[in-house]
Amino acid sequence: MNIMIDSMGNKERRKRLRLAFFAGLLAISLAAGAWSLFDSGEAISAQQVKEFTLTAEEIDWELQPGTIVKAWAYNGQVPGPEIRVTEGDLVRIHFENRLPVASTIHFHGVNVPQEMDGPAGLNQAAVEPGESFTYEFVATPSGTRWFHSHTDVATQVMLGLYGSFIVEPKSPQVAFDREYTYVLSEWDLELTPEVAMGLEPRGPRDSQLRGGEFGADLFLFNGKMHDGIAPMLVEEGDRVLIRLINAGTMAHPFHTHGHSFRVVGTDGNLVPEAAQIVKDTIMIAPGERYDLLLVADNPGVWMVHCHIENHADNGMMTVIQYRGVMPSGPIAENWNPKTGGLAVPSKDPSMGMGHALHHAADPASGASETPSAEAPVPAGEAVVALADNRYVPGGITVTAGTTVTFQNTGGNWHSVKGNGGAIDSGSIESGGDWSYTFDEPGVFKLICIQHIRQGMSGEVIVVAADE
């Protein structure tokens, strides 16, 4: 009996010891948890918070000088403003919808919480006109990402609701001296806000397309076409990072003249050095991104364009401009080597107005500087056609005082520019025309600013009426 009592007492003591032991473990765990929570709180307080506002609204947008369309845009521009954050940042995007229709935003390639992903109906209710919504997420992974509308996507993105979203890595992964982002897209002249809202029917060409497809008339880099596109300005020896984002509905082969490039990123993700390939043309599909590293080791002015040639003809073309270098072709007369674009005298005091090359006899030979293979058109009227990629005729001789009418008989936009910018028609749409009176004798070299890179140039020789 005493043994039983002692045994029971030992059991009780062992039980109490076990309880004390587990209580101690619990206390240690709670303390560790408290420290963990405290440490986590410190991490949150140290985390960078980046806040931005994106306001969607209807605007007038200039695709190229003189070509204005109705667009839906973020913060008054197409593409929307480029957003840059660092990997691990807490990002808050305050979206304000001033459109006449509901909309949402999708952050393409960013690993956001489900409720922040943007597809209307699936992950969130659409943000109605006049309402707002705040997207909040941690910026990950690093790389070239982008954002776009995810409500009625087929029309809203095509009307301009997209932009680049760059998540910079905490530790640099690719060394470069200059950086350019090019967002590729298309523009359908028949797709208006009224069509997108269902207030007007599709245009005659769009109505013939199947499967909900919309057509494309113009092809854009960064919401611009032709000379509206900013060039790549470089210095010899620069390592240039080119970020490509295809926000459109078509694939585009991006081609650089005079240079090859190394593919260092795909869809924003770093390509290991051993797997990087060297190319001069890369096909980028809708939604894709490529990061290209180009070394500026071949001074000149070099074409950069979509290698589907009608896309280049209708907008997708710019240049690599080595600072201070002039192009070697006819465009040089109207070129500004500082900016890598056509000179606009009213806005560019560094460029002269140019001058006509007047007849001047060579003292040695007595020959005229300006040969004329045909009799001049009598003073009055003359017509030059702007066929696609050529002036017809390519050269014409007229007498001083003649008004020349330039008629766009092609399917593309065309223009007439010359004399250092003093002659400037602006954009002439298909079927349109523009007239200019040549009062002074001289040789006037003319170009189409949209298609000079395809060789579209012409010449008007003006002789005195008594010659």
Image (spheres, rainbow, N blue to C red):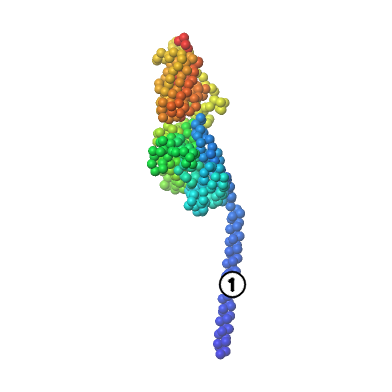
Relative image position of residue 25 (x, y in whole percent): 57, 70
Residue 344, can we see it? yes
The quarter in which the C terminus is drawn is top left
Residue 317, can we see it? no
Q: Is residue 419 left or right of residue 308?
A: right
Q: Is residue 54 above or below residue 369?
A: below
Q: Is residue 427 above or below residue 154?
A: above
Relative image position of residue 440 (x, y in whole percent): 50, 15
Relative image position of residue 106 (x, y in whole percent): 50, 47
Identity of the residue drawn at 56% across and 43% down:
98
Q: Is residue 364 above or below residue 17?
A: above
Q: Which residue is the site of mark 1?
A: 23
Q: Is residue 403 above or below residue 175?
A: above
Identity of the residue drawn at 43% across and 16% down:
397
Relative image position of residue 439 (x, y in whole percent): 50, 16
In this view, the residue in front, 230 or 399, is 399
The kind of residue on which mark 1 rests is: Ala
